[in-house]
Image (cartoon, helix red, strand yellow):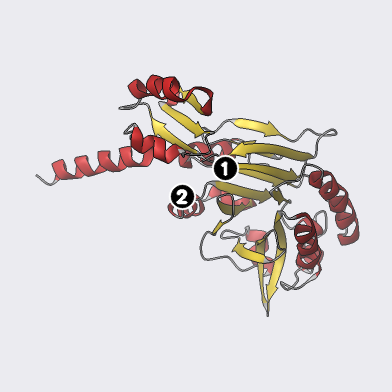
Amino acid sequence: MARWVRLCSINFHGQGSREANWHHASQLLEQALWDKPDLILLPETFSGLGMGERDWFNTAEPPDGETITRLSGIARQHRTHIACPVLLKHRSTVYNAIVLLDRKGEIAGSYYKMFPTLGELSLGVTPGAEATVIETDFGRVGFAICFDLNFREVADDLHAKGAELVCFSSMYPGGMQLQYWSLEHHWWMLSAIASLQGMLVDPLGRVRKAAQPNYQPVLSVSVNLDCLVAHLDYNHDKLQQIKRDFGHEVEIDILQPEARFLLTCHREDTSAHELARRYDLLLWDDYFRRARHERSTRLTR
């Protein structure tokens, strides 16, 4: 079944103080809420942007601190999810975290940055142990923060846990690395950056929309998460029949040089994976799992 979700990312340069960052973020949050989003993503530790290292580290706060409390009220009032990046303090331990607030303003789950930078580690930021994927009312949402983008362990764990949308909150834009992660793991990827360079990337690694410096710091877009990626091998001859049967209710986007396609289902009475079963489509992961299995059986003969 179609699972439309309105996503917003807020992108802005650090203002140099906690008060100035909050003032600017509040203005952009108001703009984002005009579109009645299902999820809003903010830049990495947004309340500490533009500060010196020690002042930034000193913005760490507990789960019931100002940042989460204020955003919790906004999430509850507007019935939206907010992915809240914050330096989170548990007793004496400090994490670079993203806390997901649900539509009731309650904490649905948290992600602790698995790979803090060398500078963060020297300041006392503690690494997280694993990736986080949270089940929401529109799909499975995972997270990554800045330097994480350079480490396969994060992406592999997110993929293993079934992420459909990955929220990337960061100081640096990531650029083609976001596209590579999406292409490799077949998820949507939304970024919120401490500059005006946030973007939305689709499961074929294509940039669908990007924030526009000076004009559009709030990126807002609707996507249908009811989709899947499959290889063209063993499937390409079935695609015409699917279109004949379902027409505009099913989109098929082919990435021919990379030998794959994205199938998106807009129907209310069936899903992309149900269509895959009906037409016996060989999905991407299943194809390569089968190839590995067949290879291993021949190696052991």
Q: CA distance from mark 1 to mark 2?
A: 20 Å
Residue positioned 82% across, 54% down in the render: 50
Residue 136 screen position, x and y as percent = 58, 55
Is the residue 147 above or below the residue 104 in the image?
A: above
Most foreground residue, 273 or 48: 273
The secondary element bearing badge 2 is classed as: helix
Q: Secondary structure at mark 1?
A: loop
The answer to whether residue 65 is left or right of residue 288 is right
125 relative to 172, above or below: below
Disc sitting over residue 47 in the figure: none
Instruction: Determine which quarter of the picture holds residue 230.
Output: top left
The amino acid pointed to by label 1 is Arg
Of pointers 1 and 2, the one earlier in the residue sequence: 1
The vertical placement of 43 against 73, above or below, is above
- Image quarter where the C terminus lies is top left
Whether residue 178 is visible here, answered yes or no, is yes
The answer to whether residue 197 shows anywhere in this view is: no
Give 18 or 6, whichever is nearer the viewer: 6
Determine which residue is flagged by label 2: 159
How many discs appear?
Answer: 2
- Callout 2, which amino acid? His
For the residue pair 190 and 273, the one nearer the viewer reads as: 273
Q: Which residue is mark 1?
A: 3
